[in-house]
Amino acid sequence: MKHYDIILIGTGQATGTILGELLDRNLSVATVERDRVGGSCVNWGCTPTKTLVASARASHVVKTAGRFGIELGDHTVEFGTVMERVNQMRIPATQGFQAWLEEATDFHHGAARFVDAHTVEVNGEQLHGDKIVIHTGARARVPQIAGLDAVPWLDNRGILDLEELPQHLLVLGGSYIGLEFAQAFRRLGSAVTVFEHNNRIVTREDEDISAVALEVLSGEGIAFELEADALSTEQLGGTSSGVRLHYRQNGHDRYADGSHLLLAVGRQPNTDDLNLSAAGVQTDSRGFIPVDEVGRTSVEHIYALGDVNARGAFTHTSVHDGQVFLDHLSGGTRRISDRVPIHSMFIDPPLARVGMSEAEARTTNKRVLIGSMPMSKVNRAREKDETAGLIKVLVDAETHRLLGATIFGVGGDEIIGMLAVVMQAGLPYTALQETVLPHPTVSELIPWIFNDLTALQASP
């Protein structure tokens, strides 16, 4: 049996974050990966999807060029070329990462399964680790829908393997993943219908944000069926003739026919086949691994980083988990809870938030001030003819510190980082008002929003 200082199970972004320093410390490391090296971000998440979104935006810009006085006539989307570009982005990244792992570590391609608290088995070989890091990520949750096993449904992985543009894409789920794909494929030329069981989309955000998102996406021709509960599916005609989705809406049974069905109703952790009970590692009712402030599981020497620990579902939270883990190994004091929550949804315009939403702020015992501005009042947005959306800020009335901000509009995915720095540093909002920002930009208007703060009413 081979012995290692550390065994890394899974090769997502936390692995890339911590491995270099582990090797610099001359620790012996084994890495294990059952699928493609790099995890979701490189293979089926950030890298390929944002590449796809960029192609879709290019198509949209061409289609709407007339508003800028440029007439281009009809244009054609070469979907094969679009997907070739997607693969040119993700495949080399995966190959390069794997080459590094094979050179710098004892790399094992296969599924890991715990034998005991210090031992995992891969392809019949047992590996012993003083410390073990679980970094196996998450996958699309497959809902319990009658007939689903008989139709060729897609998830965020399968949809990236398409070779032909869907004629009519049915999307089950009106949140981040579903909406990004919905808009991208609509802009590339597919008919798209989104089904959401709630009465609004992106329910993690405030109601006004959801309303603007619905208006923007509907305006591009995406159809929405809200308060729609999926009942069953069936295949139409032959093996490639499409799928019918039966659903219930407002007490009525309805159906919709499409060429493809995308499932985007949530994520589930990749823990079910790790045999965690053999190591004594506890999981919650959904299969996620609870961890403490440094990523440590219920077993002292076993850690869980990234999506699998339910402390974040983004590449940046996975990277931060890795940074906290390294600091912990050095005797530092960094904690997972020290980070300010931040995320972006890459529809166009992008939707970004840091800290609390307005709804969350209403439930606190704090005296909160709120300020907002529609993007239509931002000169830079008007110049670019991208005026959809709004900016919203939340401030602690006593400390003047920023509690949260939402930027739904052009440049929001980049500008949100400026506000994250202010929050992380614990600065008052007046620090922004005293900062000179370049003109003409979207960001230069944010300090002025604080001039008109009003009291936020608590939830009844």
Image (spheres, grey):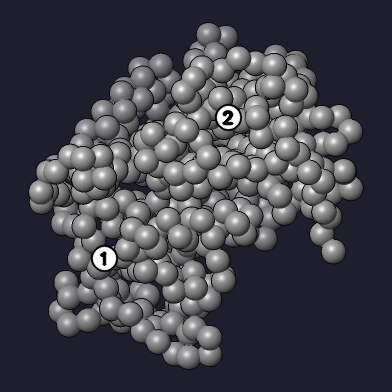
Report the quarter where the C terminus lies: bottom right
The image's mark for residue 191 is 1
Tell me what residue is drawn at x 63 percent, y 20 percent. 326
Question: Quick check: 448 left or right of 136?
Answer: right
**Front residue of this view, candidates 139 and 378:** 378
Work out whether 49 lies above or below 215.
above
**Residue 282 seen in the current view:** no
Tell me what residue is drawn at x 10 percent, y 51 percent. 74
Distance of mark 2 from mark 1, alpha carbons?
37 Å
**Front residue of this view, candidates 90 and 27:** 90
Residue 438 percent location from the top left of the image:
51, 17
Residue 256 in which image quadrant: bottom left
Tell me what residue is drawn at x 30 percent, y 39 percent. 54
Residue under numbered circle 2 = 445
Residue 60 percent location from the top left of the image:
26, 47
**Residue 62 seen in the current view:** yes
Q: Amino acid at mark 2?
A: Leu
Q: Amino acid at mark 1?
A: Ala
Residue 311 in which image quadrant: top right
Work out whether 148 lies above or below 341.
below
Whether pointer 2 and pointer 1 mark residues with C-beta atoms closer than 8 Å, the reply is no
Residue mark closest to the camera, 2 vs 1 = 2
Residue 48 in which image quadrant: top left
The image's mark for residue 356 is none
